[in-house]
Image: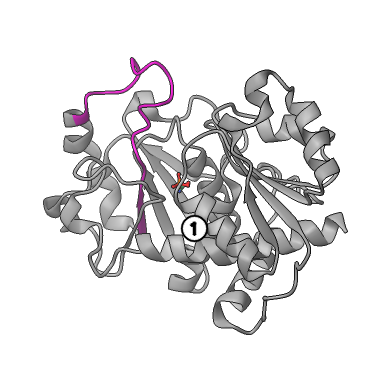
Amino acid sequence: MTFQRHFLDLDDAQTPAIESLIARARQFKSGVAHATTRLRGKLVLGMFFEASTRTATSFAAAAYRLGATWHDFGAATSSMSKGETPADTMHTVRAVGADAIVVRHWESGYPHALAPHFHGSILNAGDGSHAHPTQGVLDAMTLVEEFGTLAGRRLIICGDIRHSRVARSSARAAWLLGAKVTLCAPPLLLPQTSPGWGFSELSTVLDDCLPQADALMLLRVQTERGDGTELPPFADLVEGYGLTEERLKLLPDHCIIMHPGPVNRDVEVAASLIRVQRSRIDRQVENGVFVRMAVLERALHHAA
Ligand code: CP
């Protein structure tokens, strides 16, 4: 994990770093740590080249709760649209006084390329199909809240694994905390290579995985990635890999349902199951605020 002043991915992350962020996030959540003035005077820019609801608003809420100022950089209306280079943009926004930049981009590695040009903190809010590190930590936090220790617990991540930055980061975070992680998808949507992943096994048959699951995380089919030729028809994905009322019966009673959002209703999960009692989908979003508070606090502390 690159986390001195930047937070770029979990590729080299070690267990204590994940545990420490979750512990801090839980302090914020429980009110043990009072947050309001901790980052007073700091300026955080949201630089989103791709759409976001959860990540953008929860980073903004996290900055607000810590006393920092959040400003939406407006990538499409910035001078980058007139050809200003990413490197020059980094120097410009630093000269304005930005302390941290929260970046989402469709290109894998984009935040990593910005980092050498910015003398504050770059926080990755999702780069292509590579990494979504705050999502990985918030998913791990949601599992820890549920089960205490993750040792021996089985997380099934099912769906469009191949295009998913969430799968890579969430699998690794849970695996570092001791979970057994199964990635389940049609053959074409399983990862082609394994560096940076944390998983115990691959499967192409969801129904075989379900009886062993402590947590089932469904992933969105990402039609915006690739050229679409590698995606099976939606009907086949629903039939083989969607969580339906019928398939729910194969899960143990204690198994929780997760999804990073946004959900394709009635594709990866039946609309009727999105907010059932065992769903933790809204809890994941809630936890995102506290994890992002912990990440912002740590990053800006390192940068100070
Ligand atoms: N989980 C997630 O990244 O959601 P958004 O695309 O809405 O930020």
Does label 1 point to a residue whose CB lies under 8 Å from ligand 1? no
User: Mark 1 is on which residue type?
Assistant: Asp
- For the view shown, which residue lies furthest in the left direction? 246
Left/right of residue 124 with respect to residue 50 in the rendered view: right
Left/right of residue 9 with respect to residue 273 in the rendered view: right
Q: Nearer the viewer, residue 261 or 22?
A: 261
Which residue is under mark 1? 139
Give residue 206's quadrant in the image: top left
**SS at mark 1 in the image:** helix
Left/right of residue 169 with respect to residue 294 in the rendered view: left
Dominant SS of magenta comes to loop
Q: Nearer the viewer, residue 284 or 214?
A: 284
**Spot occupied by residue 204 in the image (x, y as percentages of width and height):** 31, 34
**Spot occupied by residue 190 in the image (x, y as percentages of width and height):** 41, 30
- For the view shown, which residue lies furthest in the bottom direction? 32
Q: Which residues are magenta?
A: 214-234
Q: Name the residue: 49% across, 58% down.
A: 139
Residue 263, above or below 176: above
Whether the magenta-drawn stretch holds residue 217 is answered as yes
